[in-house]
Every structure is written in C-alpha cells, then in structure tokens.
Image (cartoon, grey):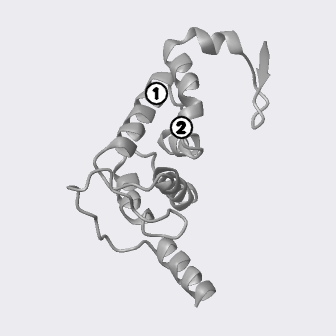
Amino acid sequence: MILHCPCCHAQFSIEAIIQDEAARELLSMKADLPPATFSYLALFRSEKRALSWERALRLVREVVDIGKGDACVAPTGLDAAMAETVEALRGKGGAPLKNHNYLKRVLETVGRSPSGGELVCRDASVPRRDAPLSKTAEALTRLENWKHG
C-alpha cells in the first residue's frame, strides 16, 4: 500500500514503516496520545533532518511520563500545554528543542487557565504549584472573567 504525504506529496510504502520496530510501537500508541503530541514532536526536528522513529518514540515516552508524573495535571492539561508550546514556539524560528523544560513550565501554568481546566492533583500530598500565568493564559482568564462578569 502506497501512502502520499499531504504536505510534500512524497510517496512511501506503509510496509516500510511497519518494518521499523520503533515506528510500529509509536503508531500503536497514537490512539492513546493527546492530539497535540505530533505537532509538539515537530518542534524537535531540525530543518535539515527528519526526526528518527527511535527519537520520536523516546520523546513520546518522556511526554507520557511527564503527564503521569507527580505533578498536578488536569485531564486535558498535557494536551493544552503541548498546544500552547507549539503555538508559542512555531513562529519563532529558533533552534529545535533539546528537552521538555519549556513544556514543563507551560504545564505548570496551563492548568490554571480556563482552557486547561482546574488543576487536579493525583496525590493529595503533592502541593499545587502557584506559578505566574503565561500571557496567553492571563488573557484567556481575563476574557473568561469578562464573559461571566
């Protein structure tokens, strides 16, 4: 079966993808991943090289671990944090991301915004982080307050 890339119109065989163990595992995880995951992964790709299947799988595992970690995360918080990270960094044209530190900082604030929902701690012994809101989250909060007030 031949697939066509909707962006560059390149053709490739699905058999070639499923022969790679990392690609197979990554594709099998896709249904359980937040929708913004693959857009977020694109932030790690350099302009001249594609992201290898092995690196993409490692990055996805790290993101899943961040979502399951001991931080207080709303059910949609990880997806909202990845979407906000993509939105903030996509147009900047900087170097590819090397780690998830930016996502972790966004994740601390996105749970307080109306779009991310209220923070829900998985463990009552984990303290809530009261980090300052990002400009986007602050603007969303103001709009939400204006709508209700």
Q: Is residue 126 left or right of residue 41?
A: left
**Three-letter code for the amino acid on which mark 2 is drawn:** Leu
Q: What is the quadrant of residue 3 in the picture?
A: top right
Question: Relative to the observer, which residue lies in front, 122 or 43?
Answer: 122
Residue bearing the label numbered 1: 57
Q: Is residue 31 left or right of residue 103?
A: right
Q: Is residue 70 left or right of residue 113?
A: left
Counting from the top left corner in percent of width and height, residue 108 is at 35, 61
Residue bearing the label numbered 2: 33
Counting from the top left corner in percent of width and height, residue 99 is at 35, 44
Question: Relative to the observer, which residue lies in front, 3 or 27?
Answer: 27
**Three-letter code for the amino acid on which mark 1 is drawn:** Leu
Counting from the top left corner in percent of width and height, residue 69 is at 31, 44
Q: What is the quadrant of residue 148 in the picture?
A: bottom right
Question: Which residue lies at the image location 43% right of the left edge and 71% below the top edge?
Answer: 134
Question: Which residue lies at the image location 54% right of the left edge and 12% below the top edge?
Answer: 20
